[in-house]
Amino acid sequence: MSDPLTESELRQRAVSLLARRDHARRELETKLRNKVGEHPALGAVMDWCEEHGFIDDRRFAGFFVRSRIDRGQGPLRIRQELQQRAVASELIEQALAEAEVDWFALAREVRARRFRQCPQDQKEKAKQLRFLQGRGFDAEQSFAALDSRPDE
C-alpha cells in the first residue's frame, strides 16, 4: 500500500490541475477528491488555493461565460453548466450581465452559421428551433432568430 499524500503533495496536484485550465472551487475539490479520496487536508488545500488567487469563482465564471459565448451558446445553457460546476447563482448572473452580449443577435448569428437559409416550412422551422434551444437560447430569442432575414 502506498503512503498517504502529504498536504504539500495535495497542493501540487491542485496546482497541476489548475495549470491546465481554470476551475471553480467545488469543481477542483471534486476532482481532487475523486483522485485521492477523502483527505484530511483537502479543505485546507482549497483555502490555500483561494488565498493565493489560484481559484476564484468570480473570475472563473467570467472566463467561462465568454468562452461559451464564443462557441455560440445561449444564456440558459451557460447558466446550467455553471450551476453544474457549483458556481454561486449571484456570480453566474453577474458574469452573464457583465458579458454585455446581445443574445438575440448571437442567436441570429448562430442560426445563420448553421443553416444557410431561413426555414421554408414548419418542419424546417421546428428543426432550427430545436437547434437554437439546444444551444441554450430561450424561446423569445429563438423565435426572433427564426423570423429574421439573413441580411439582418
Image (cartoon, rainbow, N blue to C red):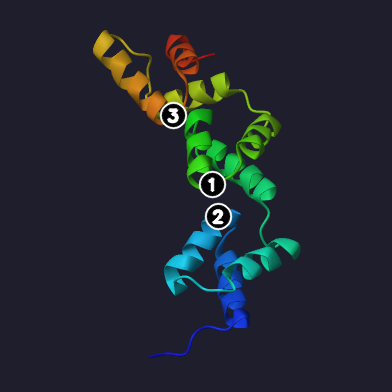
Name the element at disc 2: helix
Return the residue at label 2: 26
Residue 69 position by quadrant: top right
Name the front one of labels 1 and 3: 1
In this picture, residue 48 sits left or right of residue 112 = right
- What's under tag 1, amino acid-wise? Ala
Return the residue at label 1: 86
- What's under tag 3, amino acid-wise? Arg
Name the front one of labels 2 and 3: 2
- Residues under numbered marks 1 and 2 in contact, where contact means CB atoms less than 8 Å apart: yes
- Residues under numbered marks 1 and 3 in contact, where contact means CB atoms less than 8 Å apart: no
Return the residue at label 3: 113
Q: Residue at x 57, y 60 (%)?
A: 21
Between discs 1 and 3, the one toward the N terminus: 1
The crowd level at tag 1 (other Cα within 10 Å; few <14, some 14-19, many 20+) is some
Count of labels in the image: 3
Q: Residue at x 48, y 12 (%)?
A: 144
The crowd level at tag 2 (other Cα within 10 Å; few <14, some 14-19, many 20+) is some
How far is mark 1 from mark 3, CA to CA? 32 Å
Q: Quadrant of the N terminus?
A: bottom left
How far is mark 1 from mark 2, CA to CA? 6 Å
